[in-house]
C-alpha cells in the first residue's frame, strides 16, 4: 500500500521533471484567431547575455538555417532599418505552401526589434521581438499578427501553424544558446 501511495504522489513529479528536460529553454507558444488574423505569442529563455541575444536576433541571413525558412536575404540597410526578403514554407492540409515577403525590421537599442511586411503573400504581418535580460540569461519574446491571404479559413491555418511553429522556436532557442557573436561591440 505504501508503494502505491508513493507512486501516486511521485508520478506527477517525474512528469514535471521529464517535461522540463524536454523543454530546457522554457519555450512557450500560443496562437489564436482574432477577426481573421492569427495572433502569435512565443517566448524562450536562453543562457546568453543581452548583447549576444541581440546579435542572434538581428542575424537576418542566418534565419535560413531555421526549418521552414527557405531563404532570408538582407536587401537593404539604412540606419536602424533593415529590409529582408524571405521565403517560408508552411504545410497546410498536407500541401506545402510557399510564402514570399519583404519585411522591414526596425532595430531599437539592443532590446527590441519591430517588424512589418511591406510586400508579400500575406495580407498583413507585423510584430516584434523583445529581449529581457535576467542575470545570466535573456528571454526572447515574440509577438506577431498575421492575416493570411488564402481561401482556407484562418482557424484551419492557425491549427497547422501552431503545430509547426513550436518546433521552429525550440530550434531557435537551441541555436541561440550556442550563439556567441564576435560582433557584440555595438551592444550598449
Image (tube, grey):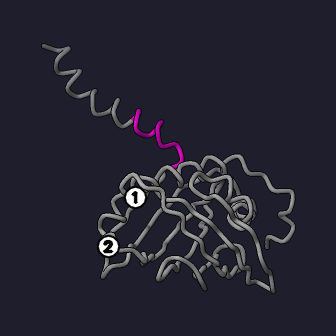
Residue at left offset 43%, top offset 77%: 149
User: In the visual, does 163 lie left or right of 133?
Assistant: left
Q: Is residue 56 above or below residue 80?
A: above
Q: Quadrant of residue 157?
A: bottom left
- Magenta range is 17-26
For residue 29, the mark is: none
Quadrant showing the C terminus: bottom right
Q: Quadrant of residue 57?
A: bottom right
Query: Mark 2 and mark 1 in contact (Cβ < 8 Å)?
Result: no
Question: Mark 2 or mark 1, which is nearer the start of the sequence?
Answer: 2
Residue 186, position as x, y percentages in the image? 84, 71
Q: Which mark is residue 92?
A: 1
Say above or below: 116 vs 59. Answer: below
125 or 181, nearer to the observer:
125
User: In front here: 95 or 171?
Assistant: 95
Q: Is residue 157 left or right of residue 59?
A: left
Q: Categorize mark 1 by other alpha carbons within 10 Å: few (<14), some (14-19), many (20+).
A: some
Determine whether the residue tagged by mark 2 lies in a helix, strand or loop. strand
Q: Is residue 103 left or right of residue 2?
A: right
Q: Position of residue 140 (x, y in %)?
A: 57, 63
Q: Residue, x 78% and y 52% (percent of image)?
A: 180
Rate crowding at label 2 as few (under 14), some (14 to 19) or many (20 or more) other CA atoms within 10 Å: some
Q: Residue furthest left?
A: 1
Residue at the spot of label 2: 33
Element at label 1: strand
Q: Residue at x 39, y 74 (%)?
A: 150
Q: Dominant secondary structure of the magenta stretch?
A: helix
**How far separated are the C-alphas under marks 1 and 2?**
16 Å
Residue 110 painted magenta: no
Q: Position of residue 167 (x, y in %)?
A: 49, 49
Please report the residue visible at 62 percent of the width from the left and 53 percent of the height from the top: 66
Amino acid at each position: 500500500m505504501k508503494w502505491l501511495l508513493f507512486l501516486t504522489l511521485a508520478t506527477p513529479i517525474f512528469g514535471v521533471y521529464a517535461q522540463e528536460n524536454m523543454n530546457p529553454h522554457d519555450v512557450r507558444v500560443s496562437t489564436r484567431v482574432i477577426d481573421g488574423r492569427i495572433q502569435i505569442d512565443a517566448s524562450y529563455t536562453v543562457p546568453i547575455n543581452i548583447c549576444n541575444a541581440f546579435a542572434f536576433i538581428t542575424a537576418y541571413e542566418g534565419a535560413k538555417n531555421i526549418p521552414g525558412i527557405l531563404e532570408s536575404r538582407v536587401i537593404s540597410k539604412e540606419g536602424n532599418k533593415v529590409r529582408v526578403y524571405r521565403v517560408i514554407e508552411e504545410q497546410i492540409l498536407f500541401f506545402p505552401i510557399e510564402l514570399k515577403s519583404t519585411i522591414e525590421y526596425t532595430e531599437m537599442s539592443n532590446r527590441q526589434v519591430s517588424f512589418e511586411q511591406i510586400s508579400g503573400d500575406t495580407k498583413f504581418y507585423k510584430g516584434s521581438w523583445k529581449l529581457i535580460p535576467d542575470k545570466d540569461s535573456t528571454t526572447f519574446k515574440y509577438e506577431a499578427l498575421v492575416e493570411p491571404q488564402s481561401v482556407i479559413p484562418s482557424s484551419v491555418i492557425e491549427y497547422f501553424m501552431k503545430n509547426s511553429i513550436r518546433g521552429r522556436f525550440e530550434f531557435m532557442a537551441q541555436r541561440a544558446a550556442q550563439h556567441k557573436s564576435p560582433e557584440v561591440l555595438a551592444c550598449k
